[in-house]
Image: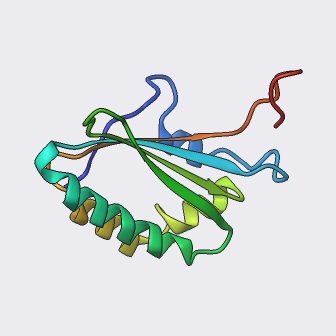
Amino acid sequence: MLKMVEMDENVTLAEQLEEEQKDSGHPIILINKLNVKPEDVDQLLKAWAADAAYLKQKPRFISTQLLRGIGGSCVYINYAVWESVEHFKQATTGDPAFKKMVLARYPDCTTGSPHLFRKVAVPGICVD
């Protein structure tokens, strides 16, 4: 079963999900750091692919990408873009079937640290 560990000690994912959509013109980004043992990498990849395929069908899902640390690392980053907090919430915590599937598919040793982000504009460097 997937074990959840908060990424931010001050703001939980549950608190983020309760935020009213103040800036509906900008998407939100889920970053989920996943750690797994080397012998369970194949099961993690299958679980992630199944979840991504399921979520890809949900309204206002934009995209996702899975990244792996180099050099034999077993740290993965799931980067997913949604049109809003509300759409992400409806597709995940608002869907009991999804929550049950997510927890059941992943190897027992897997830890996940999901957190929601928005782009930040830094003049001369990046745009929001």
Front one among 119 and 97:
119
Q: Which quadrant, please, contains the N terminus?
A: bottom left
Q: Residue at x 71, y 59 (%)?
A: 83
Front one among 66 and 11:
66
Q: Quadrant of residue 73?
A: top left
Q: Residue at x 36, y 71 (%)?
A: 50
Q: Residue furthest bottom?
A: 57
Front one among 57 and 21:
57
Residue 10's x, y, as percent?
Answer: 49, 23
Residue 26's x, y, as percent?
Answer: 80, 49
Residue 122's x, y, as percent?
Answer: 82, 22
Horizontal side of 117 relative to 49 (left or right) equals right
Q: Which quadrant, please, contains the C terminus?
A: top right
Q: Residue at x 47, y 27 (%)?
A: 8
Above or below, 54 relative to 79: below
Q: Residue at x 39, y 34 (%)?
A: 6
Horizontal side of 64 relative to 26 (left or right) equals left
Residue 9's x, y, as percent?
Answer: 43, 23
Front one among 104 and 11:
104
Q: Residue furthest front?
A: 71
